[in-house]
Image (cartoon, grey):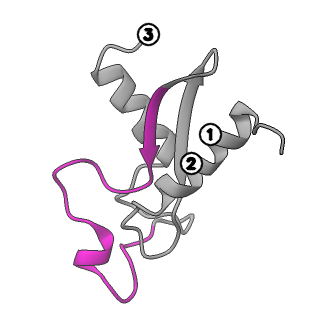
Amino acid sequence: MSSPTFDEIYMELALNLARKSHCVKIHVGAVLTKDTRIVSLGYNGPPARTHNCDQEWPEVGCPRDSKSSCSLALHAEQNAILYAAKNGVP
């Protein structure tokens, strides 16, 4: 059995992180790496300390904007980048 590549490992992690999302419509995870090391993780959802879509609107999800995107949620990549910046990751 061959060893998985780092890309395969990180993609598997991103798929598992997606399960943390509280979005009713879609679940997405993100893994930021540098030189095969994990820098930050994230998944799509509203900003910290706000309402989760599945708790506030369990049947239909959060309100949508004109492009049919959730008007409250951040993308998984945005959450990962914001967390890294907040914690001093260069």
- Residue shown at 38% from the left, 24% from the top: 84
Disc nearest the viewer among 1 and 3? 1
Amino acid on which the number 1 mark rests in the picture? Tyr
Please state the horizontal and vertical placement of residue 76, each as a whole percent of the image: 48, 47
> Which quarter of the rendering shows the C terminus?
top left
What whole-number distance in Å separates the C-alpha atoms at marks 1 and 2? 6 Å
- Residue shown at 56% from the left, 48% from the top: 14
Q: Are marks 1 and 3 in contact (CB under 8 Å)?
A: no
Which sits earlier in the primary sequence, circle 1 or circle 3? 1
The one of 40 and 6 positioned closer to us in this rendering: 6
What whole-number distance in Å separates the C-alpha atoms at marks 1 and 3? 20 Å
- Residue shown at 32% from the left, 13% from the top: 88
Q: Which residue is mark 1?
A: 10
| Element on which disc 2 rests | helix
| Element on which disc 1 rests | helix
Up-down: is 76 above or below 81?
below
Please state the horizontal and vertical placement of residue 26, each as a whole percent of the image: 53, 69
Q: Are marks 1 and 2 in contact (CB under 8 Å)?
A: yes
Amino acid on which the number 2 mark rests in the picture? Ala
Q: Quadrant of residue 83?
A: top left
Residue 90 relative to residue 54: left or right? right
Which sits earlier in the primary sequence, circle 2 or circle 3? 2
Up-down: is 79 above or below 40?
below
Up-down: is 82 above or below 14?
above
Task: Give the numbered dot on residue 14.
Answer: 2
Segment colored magenta: 39-64
